[in-house]
Amino acid sequence: MLHYPPLPTVTDGTVCGDRCGEHTDYGIITLVFCDSQPGLQVLSRSARYLDANPRPGRVLVNIGDLMQRWTGGRLHSARHRVLAPTDPKLRSQPRYSLVYFTQCDDEYIVRPLLGDPDSFPPVKTGEHMRRRFEETFQLGQGIDPQLPPL
Ligand SMILES: O=C(O)CCC(=O)C(=O)O
Ligand SMILES: [Fe+2]
């Protein structure tokens, strides 16, 4: 369960930052269950951010980096972010989302099962996950640099 705390009121008209910076998910698929608070945006293949607004009963299914590798790039690990709202009422409220990440066993080697087998080098799941955590938390790099750009 992710808890995004309430944000201070903006009085000077400055644009507020993200609640969660742009990133791709590391694993196979992610299920995102969100409350009524908006903010989640997904980058389209034409490089436009699209709102993925919550609706009762809606579940967002995200493709992760390993799924992109597994499908030889046929499924795309989309960049996404959670924007901080500008509306003072929304800012004064917390945002909650329930996020379920899936991945393979650490020893499992992910290689393309579709398309060109050389499109991605094989990676051991555990090593991939460790590298992505390090990139995110030490280098502030939320996008897998080994995946091709959009
Ligand atoms: O809170 C959300 O709606 C999405 C969070 C997310 O993208 C993540 O935890 O990877
Ligand atoms: Fe994510």
Image (cartoon, grey):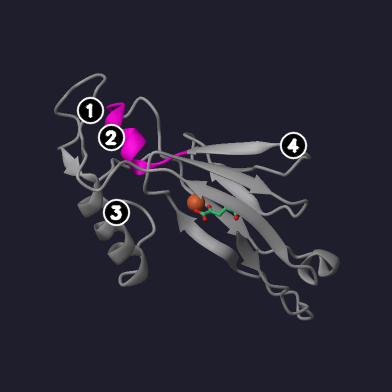
The residue tagged 1 is 112
Tell me what residue is drawn at x 76 percent, y 40 percent: 55
Q: Of the two numbered discs 4 and 3 on the same chain, state the one appearing first in sequence.
A: 4
Q: Where is residue 115 in the image (x, y as percent from the top left)?
A: 24, 19
Q: The residue tagged with tag 4: helix, strand or loop?
A: loop
- The residue to which callout 4 is attached is 57
Checking the image for residue 138, the label placed there is none
Q: Report whether 46 appears left or right of 89.
A: left
Check disc 3: other Cα within 10 Å, few if <14, some if 14-19, many if 20+.
Answer: some
Q: Do the residues labelled 1 and 2 touch (CB within 8 Å)?
A: yes
Mark 4: few, some, or many residues within 10 Å (few <14, many ≥20)? few
**From mark 3 to mark 2, how far is it between C-alphas?**
13 Å
Is 60 left or right of 150, judged from the image as shown? right
Beta carbon at label 2 within 8 Å of ligand 2: no
Q: Name above or below for residue 14 compared with residue 85.
A: below
At 78% from the left and 51% from the top, the residue drawn is 36
**Circle 3 sits on which residue?**
129
